[in-house]
Amino acid sequence: MLALAAIAVFMGKPSMETLPLQNKVDNATPVFPVLFTTIACGAISGFHSLVGSGTTSKQLDKEKDAKPIAYGGMLIECALAIMTLIAVAHATSFAGTDLAFSGATQIFGGGIASMIDPSRGTVYSVLYTLLVLTYSTFCLTSLDTATRMGRFMFQELWLDGTKGETPQNVTGYKKVLSNPYVATLITVILGVGLGMNGYAKIWALFGSANQLLAALALLAIAAWLANIGRKSFMCWAPMFFMLAVTIFSLFINTKKQFGLIAAGGVDWGPWVQAILGIIMIVLALVLAVEGVQTIFFKKHQKAEK
């Protein structure tokens, strides 16, 4: 699909003038910090920190394979992001006048296919079908991975790692809730329930929450390196930047939700966003303080002893 998209770009030579830079997003949210809380997997992504620690690490033959697989994967996804942006720019000239370009999937598949076959004949139809299938497969595999990660975290919620607890050696309610099948069933039911009852009402939190997770992953790595006496300075700049950006983004969104609540006539969406926003801000600040203490103070105390 990437090769096909690259060929389409060279064949279609689309103009980027159809995608002007806007100063506002959704007529209310400024480009900063939204630009840095957009899910861009070719850059920093909290979801990928879970995938890398939860599944990818278990699939490596040896440690040195991590760099070409993980970093190489990010480079490929960066290329995909650029191709997608070009496809959207090209499809913009058709969107609004053609129902074939009325949704994200249609814009992606139609934008690339129309570069190769501007007449939108048989070649266009075949390419469009294959591209939409690729797009759908990406969504399904992401959903599968997200469900697995959710199950892992739900299991670990009930286990005390400091005591060596595992689903096999615990008893009582912990054994039931940490059971892989029970944890998977609960995760799926919660996910489906949210999907059928207005996930879009709290979707605005996803970008900030995902990128906050990336900041916390960098914080954990830096703290671990400092704790074992290794250098961690390579994590500082992205760590502090992402912490500042995500906390600021959560603050802006939470403030906006309180404004909607004060105006009256809202459903449960703004309330949930406001409550979760406050919780994430507080927890992020607590973890940031603990992480900074570990990175910059405990390390030196250990060296002095």
Image (cartoon, helix red, strand yellow):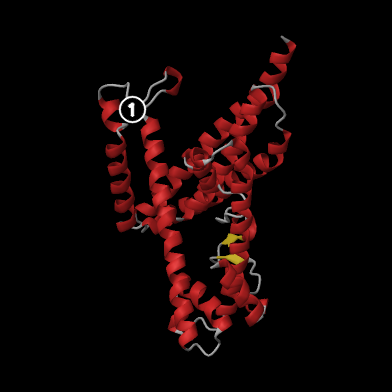
Residue 286 placed where, x, y %? Answer: 55, 30
Dot 1: within a 10 Å radius of its alpha carbon, few (fewer than 14), some, or many (20 or more) residues? Answer: some
Q: Is residue 5 left or right of residue 229?
A: left
Q: Residue furthest front?
A: 61
- Amino acid of disc 1: Pro
Quadrant of the snapshot with the C terminus: top right
Q: Is residue 20 visible?
A: yes
Please tell me which residue is depicted at 51% across the width and 81% down the height of the picture: 95
Q: Quadrant of residue 285?
A: top right
Q: Is residue 14 visible?
A: no
Q: Quadrant of residue 199?
A: bottom left
Judged from the image, the secondary structure of the residue bearing numbered disc 1 is loop
Please tell me which residue is depicted at 49% across the width and 41% down the height of the picture: 59
Q: Residue furthest top?
A: 305
Please tell me which residue is depicted at 60% across the width and 77% down the height of the picture: 8
Residue 96 placed where, x, y %? Answer: 49, 82
Depth check, front residue: 278 or 55: 55
What is the count of numbered marks?
Answer: 1
Q: Is residue 210 left or right of residue 149?
A: right
Please tell me which residue is depicted at 32% across the width and 25% down the height of the picture: 168
Depth check, front residue: 80 or 1: 1
Q: Is residue 36 above or below residue 49?
A: below
Residue that numbered label 1 is attached to: 167
Residue 247 placed where, x, y %? Answer: 58, 44
Depth check, front residue: 266 or 131: 131
Depth check, front residue: 97 or 260: 97
Residue 278 placed where, x, y %? Answer: 48, 41
